[in-house]
Image (cartoon, rainbow, N blue to C red):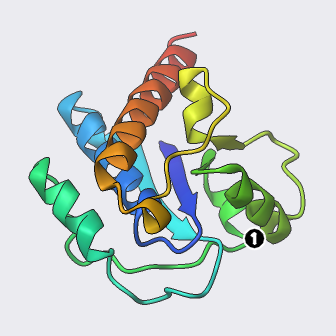
Amino acid sequence: MIKILFVCHGNICRSPMAEFVMKRLVKEKYLEKEFIIQSAATSREELGNPVYPPARRIMAQHGLSCSGKTAVQMTKADYAKYDYIIAMDSMNVRNIMRIIGSDRDSKVSLLMSFTGSSRGVADPWYTGDFDTTYRDVTEGCNALLDHILAQRSK
C-alpha cells in the first residue's frame, strides 16, 4: 500500500485539489486499492471547514467531487503513517518540518519537484486563479504518480 499525504496551509484549496486529482489518476489506472491518498493543513485556521467554494467549482468543472471533505491538521504521527508527504510550496515544507521535527526518511517533497521545477503550486487564495492552480496540481500529480510507478517497478 502506497500512502500519500498532500499538505498546504489551510487544507481548503490546493491540497484537497491534489488529493482528489491523484485519487482519480490512480483510479484511471485501476490502482485505487493500492493507494491511500489524503490531504491536511499545517495550520489550524480552517479546521472543520469544507473545501473553499471556488476550489470545489474548478474540481466540479473537471468531473471531481470533494463532497464531505473538511480541513484537518497534519500531526507528527502522520510522518510514520505516510510514505510521501507532498507540500504545495516551500512555506508548507517549513511548517511541515515544525510539525514533524525532522525528515530522516526523506518523505517530504514539493509537488512541483516531480515535474523538475523548484517552484510551488500557484496559490489561488491570493490570486483567485483556480485554473492555474488546477493545472499545476494536475501536472504535479501526474509526475508524482509516474515517479511512484517507476520506483515500484525497480
Q: Nearer the viewer, residue 39 or 36?
A: 39
Question: Which amino acid type is marked by label 1?
Answer: Lys
Horizontally, residue 152 falls left or right of residue 31, namely right
Q: Position of residue 80 (x, y in %)?
A: 71, 58
Q: Nearer the viewer, residue 65 or 58?
A: 58
Look at 48% across and 71% down and name the residue there. 11
Q: Position of residue 63 (x, y in %)?
A: 10, 50
Vertically, is 61 above or below 66? above
Horizontally, residue 115 falls left or right of residue 95, namely left
Vertically, is 119 above or below 74? above
Q: Position of residue 20 (x, y in %)?
A: 30, 53
Horizontally, residue 10 falls left or right of residue 141, namely right
Look at 52% across and 48% down and name the residue there. 3
Quarter assignment of residue 125: bottom left
Q: Residue furthest top?
A: 154
Disc 1 on helix, strand or loop? loop
